């Protein structure tokens, strides 16, 4: 259920609808599922660290974003990650922002 | 899953006339039709219903819950009647109003918790009036959005257009939406309705770029950048000089990391979906022999499709964007920066 809207099934993000190990096969093949979940967390945290926000799994079923000041927000589906992270950080994560791109380019070169 | 064909087009562009012709074809005998208003053109079809134009936006909700209420209700009613055996149909055609943005209807098909299990996007047909399109495209954002959302553009009233006007319009439409095939409204029905599947989709992307050809090393397009450190990619774009609409192709030579690509496109559409009318692409993913087709309209991305094989041509990822007021070069740079994050690439 979408925790914001109360509609069932809202958490089916388009990135899940693909037959890849750990993605479409998420109801079995637990190791592949965990590996894919870990990759997603890492990808998201790489970007979130730009504003010192951190994403974690919450009780194995939901997600939580935390700010460096200790504020946190729990949500149910990764599709809600960016609005939640922006609300917590008080600033945007804009992939076309020059500063963010330059920061990522510098990290990619490292 | 029952395909839903969305028939859209600006006011007076010949939607209902086209619908009338389509419904006379034997292949459409099993179609149910939803229209917004009964116009001057009479429609005689046994499964015809009227819907009102209404959008329900849940105030506290996220973008996934913007549901076009009356469309959802009308489709739900059709499905219930079919389940009770009172009617039968094998596809649905929805004719929108002339000023409608197709996006909310597509969103309804994808987001609605019940409908998405019964109906699927069967393609967007956009009618374009060969006589009046130039003015509409230059002055009405709705017309541009409808063209950008099209899988197939159907040119109407070509018999009334002046000599040469037809080709100039086709060129312009191809600049706005290079991924859509353009057909004449007098073409056989099979040509108007056929080939919305993944194969035809790839055919539209492979072998041509936004400006009509694959860019080679000698190509003179200013925006090329073949030498990016991490992710060899280049961009070719074409501005249409009205309403700031740009179509642009991103060609990626390296295999793509799906996890980071999903993160990047999700964030891009979250921030700029209002100004990204269309994303359509064929991707070569890491660890995947078969190509993946992706397809999005504004904030909405449809479920990616596994294609059976690569079409003729190089095994390269290509993504076509139709943008309003965004910089193609900045998108290319953003893509390369996200895909170049070493930590994710090493973990993949």
Image (cartoon, rainbow, N blue to C red):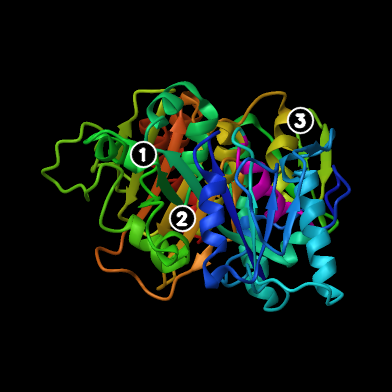
Have a look at marks 3 and 1 and say if they share a chain: no
How far apart, in angstroms, are the residues tagged by discs 3 and 2?
28 Å
Secondary structure beneath dot 1 equals helix
Left/right placement of residue B344 relative to residue A25 reads left
Q: Residue B236, image x and y in percent?
A: 28, 39
How far apart, in angstroms, are the residues tagged by discs 3 and 1?
43 Å
Residue A108 seen from this side: no
Judging by the rendered image, the residue that carries numbered circle 3 is A88
Secondary structure beneath dot 2 equals helix
Q: Could you tell me if the residues under marks 3 and 2 are in contact, i.e. CB atoms within 8 Å? A: no
Q: Chain of mark 1?
A: B
Q: Residue B239, image x and y in percent?
A: 33, 29
Residue appearing at x 34%, y 62% in the figure:
B203
Q: Residue B212, image x and y in percent?
A: 24, 46
Q: Chain of mark 3?
A: A
Judging by the rendered image, the residue that carries numbered circle 1 is B173
Judging by the rendered image, the residue that carries numbered circle 2 is B345
Say above or below: A11 vs A67.
below
Q: Chain of mark 2?
A: B
Have a look at marks 1 and 2 and say if they share a chain: yes
Q: Which mark is residue A98?
A: none
Residue A105 lies within the magenta run: no
Residue appearing at x 49%, y 38% in the figure:
B13
Q: Which residues are magenta?
A: B100-113
Q: Quadrant of residue A84?
A: top right
Left/right placement of residue B21 relative to residue B64 reads left
Q: Residue A81, image x and y in percent?
A: 71, 43
- Characterize the local packing of mark 1: few (<14), some (14-19) or many (20 or more) Cα atoms within 10 angstroms: many
Residue A15 seen from this side: yes
Could you say which is closer to the camera, residue B78 or residue B221?
B78
């Amino acid at each position: 259920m979408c925790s914001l809207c109360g509609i069932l099934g809202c958490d089916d993000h388009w990135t899940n609808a693909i037959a890849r190990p750990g993605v479409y096969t998420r109801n079995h093949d637990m190791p592949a599922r965990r590996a894919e979940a870990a990759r997603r967390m890492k990808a998201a945290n790489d970007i979130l660290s730009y504003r010192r926000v951190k994403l974690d799994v919450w009780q194995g079923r939901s997600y939580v974003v935390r700010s460096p000041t200790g504020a946190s927000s729990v949500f149910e589906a990764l599709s809600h990650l960016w609005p939640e992270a922006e609300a917590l950080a008080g600033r945007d994560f804009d992939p076309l922002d020059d500063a963010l791109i330059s920061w990522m380019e510098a990290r990619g070169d490292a | 899953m029952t395909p839903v064909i969305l028939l859209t087009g600006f006011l007076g562009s010949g939607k209902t006339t086209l619908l009338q012709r389509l419904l006379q074809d034997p292949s459409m005998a099993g179609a149910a039709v939803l229209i917004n208003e009964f116009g001057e053109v009479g429609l005689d079809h046994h499964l015809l219903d009227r819907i009102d134009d209404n959008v329900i936006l849940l105030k506290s909700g996220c973008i996934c819950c913007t549901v076009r209420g009356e469309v959802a209700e009308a489709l739900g009613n059709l499905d219930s009647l079919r389940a009770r055996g009172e009617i039968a149909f094998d596809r649905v055609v929805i004719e929108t109003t002339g000023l409608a943005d197709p996006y909310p209807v597509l969103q309804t098909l994808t987001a609605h918790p019940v409908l998405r299990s019964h109906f699927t996007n069967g393609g967007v047909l956009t009618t374009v009036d060969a006589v009046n399109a130039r003015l509409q495209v230059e002055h009405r954002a709705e017309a541009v959005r409808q063209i950008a959302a099209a899988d197939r553009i159907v040119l109407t009233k070509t018999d009334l257009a002046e000599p040469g006007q037809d080709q100039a319009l086709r060129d312009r439409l191809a600049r706005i939406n290079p991924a859509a095939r353009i057909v004449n409204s007098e073409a056989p029905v099979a040509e108007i309705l056929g080939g919305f599947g993944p194969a035809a989709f790839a055919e539209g992307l492979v072998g041509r770029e936004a400006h009509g050809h694959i860019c080679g090393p000698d190509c003179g397009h200013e925006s090329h950048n073949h030498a990016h450190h991490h992710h060899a990619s280049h961009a070719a774009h074409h501005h249409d000089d009205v309403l700031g609409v740009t179509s642009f192709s991103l060609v990626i030579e390296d295999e793509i990391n799906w996890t980071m690509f999903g993160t990047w496109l999700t964030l891009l559409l979250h921030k700029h979906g209002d100004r990204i009318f269309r994303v359509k692409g064929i991707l070569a993913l890491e660890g995947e022999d078969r190509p993946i087709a992706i397809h999005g309209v504004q904030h909405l991305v449809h479920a990616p499709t596994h294609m059976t094989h690569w079409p003729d041509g190089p095994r390269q990822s290509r993504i076509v964007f139709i943008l309003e007021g965004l910089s193609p070069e900045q998108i290319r740079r953003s893509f390369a920066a996200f895909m170049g994050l070493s930590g994710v690439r090493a973990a993949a």
